[in-house]
Image (spheres, rainbow, N blue to C red):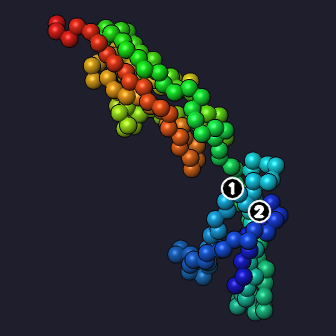
Amino acid sequence: MYVTVHCNGRALNKKVEVASDHERPERQRFHALVDFNDVRDWSSSSYYCNCEAWGKIPALKNELRKVISSSGYVRLAYFESDRFQFDPMPRSVPLDASEVTLSCTPPKGSPKPKVKWLKDGKPLDVRSQSDRITIDHQAQLIIRPLRLDDRGNYSCLAEIPGLTLASGSAELNIYGNLLR
């Protein structure tokens, strides 16, 4: 069997891996890695690829037959910059403050990046604390009411398929009369 990969009608010089299909042993699966550099000259941010295979098909009693796969469509994911537009800023707030808001602005990207928050380098569990901690539509982290254990270093992660970018971190300091 001979297999080639074509993207947007252009043949790519790529190694194609062949594996058996475990669900249907009479079939084979083909896999080829298509790198961004293979398509970077193309004007579109999306492209399609097909596999073309030539081989003998005993059931058809032929010598060689060309089979073209259905198109697989790919959309490129990218950040326009390797830095956040704005990192979170350090804050120092009294314990009796009604709330604190931390902001970060990820770089523009395609698709639009999703923002997650970290506290002391670990993912912030917003779901278990949804009565106190929220992330609004602008990816701002809002904490209300404050507790002493909210102190720490906060940072953001911007995520798009296959890529993650981290912001700088900012310390949230909470002060006040600790003896009551």
| Residue 27 shown left or right of residue 39 in the figure | left
Residue at image position (48%, 25%) is: 88
Instruction: Report which residue position mark 2 lands on.
Output: 7
Q: Is residue 53 above or below residue 168?
A: below
Mark 2 nearby-residue class (10 Å; few <14, some 14–19, many ≥20): some
Q: Position of residue 122 (x, y in %)?
A: 37, 38
Q: Is residue 66 above or below residue 12?
A: below
Image mark for residue 159: none
Which quadrant would the C terminus be assigned to in this image? Answer: top left
Q: Position of residue 55 (x, y in %)?
A: 73, 85
Instruction: Report which residue position mark 1 lands on.
Output: 36
Which quadrant would the N terminus be assigned to in this image? Answer: bottom right
Viewer-nearest residue: 99 or 70: 99
| Residue 156 shown left or right of residue 16 in the figure | left
Mark 1 nearby-residue class (10 Å; few <14, some 14–19, many ≥20): few
Residue at image position (40%, 13%) is: 99
* Tag 1 near tag 2, CB within 8 Å: no
Q: Is residue 128 above or below residue 14?
A: above
| Residue 66 shown left or right of residue 132 in the figure | right
Q: Position of residue 35 (x, y in %)?
A: 67, 59
Residue at image position (42%, 25%) is: 170
Q: Amino acid at mark 1?
A: Phe
Q: What secondary structure is found at the residue carrying circle 2?
A: strand
Answer yes or no: is residue 143 visible.
yes
Of the numbered discs 1 and 2, the one sitting upstream in the chain is 2
Task: Give the quarter of the image for residue 21.
Answer: bottom right
Answer yes or no: is residue 111 visible.
no
Per the model, the C-alpha gap separating discs 1 and 2 is: 12 Å
Counting every numbered tag in the picture gives: 2
Task: Give the quarter of the image for residue 15.
Answer: bottom right
Q: What secondary structure is found at the residue carrying circle 1?
A: helix
Q: Amino acid at mark 2?
A: Cys
